[in-house]
Each structure stands twice: as C-alpha cells, then as structure tokens.
Image: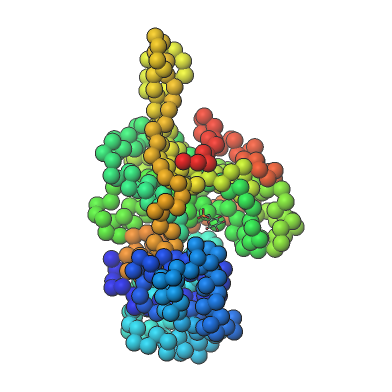
Amino acid sequence: MNGATADALVFFGATGDLAYKKIFPALQGLVRRGHLDAPVIGVAMSGWNLEQLKGRARESLEIHGGGVDPAAGEKLLRLLRYVDGDYNDPGTFKALRGELGASKRPAYYLAIPPSMFEVVVAHLGSIDEAGGGRVIVEKPFGRDLASARHLNAILHRHFSESSIFRIDHYIGKEPVINLLFFRFANAYIEPVWNRQYVESVQITMAESFGVQGRGRFYEEAGTIRDVVQNHLLQVIANLAMEPPIGVDSESLRDEKVKVVKAIRPLDPASVVRGQFRGYRDEAGVAPGSTVETFAAMKLEIHSWRWKGVPFHIRAGKCLPVTATEVVVELKSPPLIADGVPPRNHFRFLFNPGVAIALGTQFKDPGEAMQGRQVELLAGSETGKGMMDAYERLLGDSLRGDSTLFARADEVEAAWRVVDPLLAAATPVHEYAPGTWGPPEADALAPPGGWRVPKTSV
Ligand code: BG6
C-alpha cells in the first residue's frame, strides 16, 4: 500500500467514451462492494450540468453496467458532482478545488488524451498544495520511448512515483492475475518453468472485429503500440518473472521490470506486420495507410531462466476468432516407443473465459504402448464471480495499492523493446479479413506452427 484511501475521486473526461463504457459501471461495482463512499467529481468541457452527467451515468449503467442497481447505482448518482470547463482555464481548477471542499487526498483520474496531460497536471499541482493527491492515467502512455519519458517527467513534476497509477487494464484482468497465482501457488511448476524444460512459448491475441469506428485512433497506434507494448509485454512479464521476494507492490513490480529489461530491442527483421483488407476504407484512415492491424514477432528473454527459449507473439484485428491464449510448450521426453514424440504443454486461456489446461499424454487402453494427448483443464466462463478489470484497478488506486499498475521504469523498458519497430519502415502485408493474418507470419511460428486458440473453456 502506498498511502491512505483517497477521500474524493475526480475524473477528467467524464462525458467521454471511456467513462460511458467502463468507468461508471466500475464505480457502481465499487459502491456495491462498499469500496466507494467518497464524492465522485466529473470534469469535462462539454457545457453540461450535473443533471446531464447523471443522465449519462444512468444510461451508461443501463447499457454497460447491467442496469442501475437500486442501492449502489442510486448511491453513485448521489455521490456525483460535476465541474464544467476548459482544461486550459485556471478557473476550472478553482471550481474543482471548491467542489473538493475539505478533501486532502483526492485521486485524479485522467481519462483524457495524453496531449492534455501537461496542462492538467500543472493545474493540479497548483491546487494540490498539500501534495496529498494521486493521479491515475490511462493508456496510451506515450507513443514511443521519448514521449513516454516526457510524460513521466511531466507527472513527476507534481506527483511522486508512488502517487502515480498507470492503468493497463490487462494487468487487472482475472485470467492474467490467475496466471501469476497459478505459477506461484503450485509447487510443481517451478522445477519445469525454465529453459531446461520449456521448448517455446506462444501468445495469440486474436480479435475477430476490426477497428470499430476508431480508425483515427488506430492510425496513431497500430497493433504494436495498441496491444504489444503494453498488454502482451505485461503478460510476458507475469509469465516469465522470478518469484518476488515479498508480497508488497514493489517486490512484484521489481521482478516484472527485470523481465522486460532482459528483452533486447526488437530487430525489425523478426517482426511481420499485416493490415486487413478494407482497413484503408475505414473512416479516419489514410487511403495509403501503412499502419498495422496485425503483428507477429519472435523475441527472447536474455535471463538465466529463459535464455534460448523463443517467445512467439501474434495479435491482430479481423482474425477468425476472438480469443487470447498462451501456450507454454515443454520439451519432449525421450521416446519410449515408435511414433511421434509425446509433448506436454500448459495452456492459459484469457478470453473468452478463463482456463488453465495441462496437455498430458494418456495411454490408450490395449496392448500397444500408445497414447494420445488429453488436457487436464480447470476453468470458468466469463462473468462468473469475475471482477471487471476497471473496477479492480480503480478500487486499488483509491486504496493506494500500486501492485497492478505499470511503473515508470517498466513502461519505458517496454517502449525500448518495441521502439526499433516503430521507426523502421518494414513492409505491411495485406490479409483477408477472417484469416490468420498474412502468410508471411508463418515464418515466425514455433516449430509445430501457430496454434489456433480455443474459443471456449
Ligand atoms: C485495448 C485496445 O487496450 O484493448 C483495443 O485499445 C483492444 O484495440 C482491447 O481491442 C482489448 O482488450 P479487451 O479487454 O477488450 O480484451
């Protein structure tokens, strides 16, 4: 824990899309669990009033939050306040200070474009004289190493690192946390979790949909910036980290950052970029755009544990299914009979649902020493008792627990890994929507080929 519970939540961008789709539902969840009892002050420059914000919150809960909970939803609406104004205007922040009243430990959530961070943070510095505030920021956290460093410097002008909560919603997902739990709560994993036993690791993050009207955003991002630099490197950090020396947030984050630092900046030759046919016709997309909607790559972690084990990654839009899966393939044991060498694997399904499966050889009944691979599986469907990532992360940041947030050094280390890819003008190969990306990506597949992820638990 890095401090006491925040006594107010201020969220900038209150009338925006993120607030509508994610934040109001998460706040209702927090109130329901008894984790939020402080004023919630929305700030935006929309010319709205409090009643309009409440109307928007109601609609958000109806559509994205499973309905307005008669107790928690209504209470959230009572906790809501609203400040309307331009982020460049000191008057907006004076009004905000007025709404904050006696609050000494506000949490400022910046659900706004990073281009607005500098001005908002400077104003916050001027109203947060006692220095009790904390700041919660959203991805994208920069667009390369230089801009991420710049953003960190801006935040550090007014907030200490322990008061900065960088949200990567993937780290707050139940299956990603389960991966960590699985690794360190099971004694039989550790002896095989290294280069002696692991042949390869492959991660597929497939989405069957396109850019869903976010063409303008996507033109600035592309798959590598959108999901590889953050979500997938975070998954790799959880998968590959050393056991932390303690359960405190810094011990865990120290180990994660070491993994990312042990990945060398990627060689553009070890990456294949693709773009689905039709992307250039999307609103907000340049007719000759070379932004990737698919990326496949191979990387290595240069650590004592992982040296020599290839990590194969692919992610993309308009692929055949929506599923995220990690498969850790073990080396074959010596053959005891003719035939295909048996294999074992660990499979982690992150989406849809959450599942962990152990690929195991099982003898067929009969005379022959022959068997087949079966999976021992534990899992649950999405929704059953699972906490939404935003609810978890907002709750943690209000309580001051940094464990599941990206630290400055980790964010910068992750940008250092992908930076060479962003600068290089590598070809972008077209692929047909509904296929597994361009055929060129096969050259980066593990020896047995890319696995098609399962789409159910
Ligand atoms: C977001 C990306 O960060 O993560 C999106 O901007 C992507 O492009 C999304 O679709 C995936 O997250 P989830 O939680 O929807 O699987």
Horizontal side, residue 310 vs residue 223: left or right: left
Q: Indicate the quadrant where residue 133 lies.
A: bottom left
Quadrant in which residue 1 is drawn? bottom left
Q: Is residue 139 above or below residue 315?
A: below
Q: What colour scheme does the image use?
A: rainbow
Taking the spot 47% from the left edge, 89% from the top edge, the residue there is 95
Q: Is residue 371 visible?
A: yes
Count numbered badges in the picture: 0
Q: In the picture shown, does residue 109 fall above or below 202?
A: below
Query: At x 56% / y 46%, what residue is drawn?
Result: 322
Task: Say if 329 sits above or below 100 in the image.
Answer: above
| Residue 164 position within the rendered picture, expressed as x and y whole percent measured from the top left | 39, 69
Residue shown at 41% from the left, 54% from the top = 386
Q: Where does the image place residue 265, in percent across and percent down from the top left?
A: 48, 50
- Residue furthest to the left: 246
What residue is shown at x 44% (from left), y 35% (from top)? Answer: 200
Q: Nearer the viewer, residue 39 or 9?
A: 39
Question: Residue most toward the front?
Answer: 70
Residue 121 showing in the rendered view: no
The picture places residue 223, in percent across and down from the top left corner, at 58, 53
Vertical side of 361 occupied by 455: above or below: below
Is 133 displayed left or right of 122 in the figure?
Answer: left
Q: Is residue 338 left or right of residue 322?
A: left
x, y (%) of residue 144?
53, 61
Is 267 on the left or on the right of 168, as rendered?
A: right
The one nearer the camera, 455 or 201, is: 455
